[in-house]
Image (tube, rainbow, N blue to C red):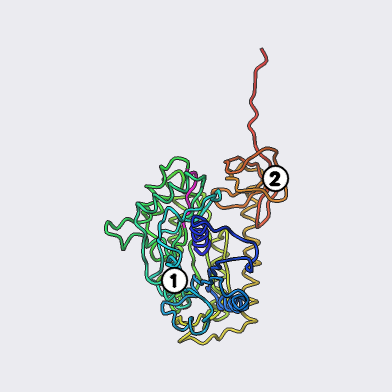
Amino acid sequence: MNKAESERLSAYLEYLGYQPVEKPDRADIIILNSCVVRQSAENRVENKLHTLKGLKKTRPQITLAVTGCFVEPDTARLRKAFPFIDHFFAAGSFPEFLGEYHVEKMLPRSPQVATYVPIMQGCDNFCAYCIVPYRRGRERSRPLVEVVNEVTGLVNRGVKEITLLGQNVDSYGHDLPDKPDLADLLQVLDPIDGLLRIRFLTNHPKDMKDKLIDTVASLEKVCEQINLPVQAGDDVTLKAMRRGYVIEHYRQLISRIRAKIPHIALSTDVIVGFPGETDAQYESTYALLSELKFDMVHAAAYSPRTGTLAAREMPDDVTAEDKKLRLQKLEKQQAQILGAINAGLQDKLVEVLVEGQEKERWFGRTRTDKLVFFRAEGDYQSKLVRIKINHTSPWSLSGRLWIEQLSFETI
């Protein structure tokens, strides 16, 4: 989400005549787009702001602005703490000091092969550990026609793949007059000429419906990849997290997805060391990941976020050492699982959308979001190619360009 918002802000600045510079001390405007999902991230933001304070002293004419989840709804405290910052504006909003807002003027001038499209802002779930609803507000969906127009504009500029973004995309549209949902949006986007792939994230297990699963299974351009955060494998922990479901519900949901979309790649998010998590509860999470075998697990150790329910009411009683050990054990298991999954692609043909070059190798991703490298002469940027995999690892694949050999009869 932050990356998508940064791209849009950059595009609008370029529309206004500004050009990017490599060093902050050469800039006329600096916008710091902050992520504060974890306390350590917020600490880095504050450190960066203190660095900018020195720059403001030497160049008082420079414009400094801060956005992202660091910015609270009431900016009075921030203005008092950081008086040298000229503008604070909420995550996902538009800075008024830049002028009038126009969506079409915020589209990247030279976009990447694959890009992000926010379809909604905010979240209504208030999970105990999460700061997002307090910083980004309640759920607000973009009108369906606005999203379609943006995607069409991006495709006309060369984009081949889009990822629809929301803190909880399964809630998309419930606040709009006609109440379209994510499945309806996918149905409208799929026929757009020139668009090759569609992805979306992030889903919430309590809100994901069978209609969406059926839609993903039926549409050609929607990739066989779903991120479905479980966060913990224990019902007591999930209740403390205020996630709104139990593990059996999650298992059944995974089963339905895999039954409807057999080649689906599933990823998940996990928090270890949440307040009150016992060794046994952690082992339940470990066992669940062993059972379900995800293609990717985004794991993090819990850290209190000031302002959240967990930080206010739950002692951070799992030691830092225990969190570290639990995280390492989980990551080691996942590397083994992913290594085995990817090994199954050895000598298989996969479809890759080429995104660029790195050290004389082309790279891109499969429909299931596997990173693939290959060597080939010629220009394959933005092209769909078939690659025969000849090397696998837990984190990437490599292979050779597959060109079908035509067979001719001798006459």
What type is the residue that disc 2 sits on?
Asn
Residue at (58% x, 69% y) in the render: 299
Q: Mark 1 falls on what kind of element?
A: loop
Label 2 close to label 1 by CB (< 8 Å): no
Majority secondary structure of magenta residues = strand
Residue 283 place in picture, x, y as percent: 57, 74
Give amino acid for label 1. Ala
Q: Residues within 10 Å of mark 1 (few under 14, many from 20)?
A: many
Magenta highlight on residue 25 = no
Q: Start and end of the magenta stretch?
A: 195-200
> Residue beneath label 1, please?
90
Near-viewer residue (24 or 218) = 24
Nearer-the-camera pick, 152 or 392: 152
Depth order, front residue of 12/4? 12
Q: List x then y, in percent, for residue 407.
A: 64, 23
Disc with the residue nearer the chain's start (2 vs 1)? 1
Q: Is residue 232 visible?
A: no
Residue nearest the observer in this picture, 332 or 395 = 395
The residue wearing badge 2 is 390
On screen, residue 297 above or below 58 = above
Q: Is residue 154 left or right of residue 342?
A: left
Place of residue 345 in the rendered image (x, y in percent of width and height, measured from the top left): 63, 48
Q: Quick check: 155 above or below 76?
A: above
Q: Residue furthest right?
A: 359
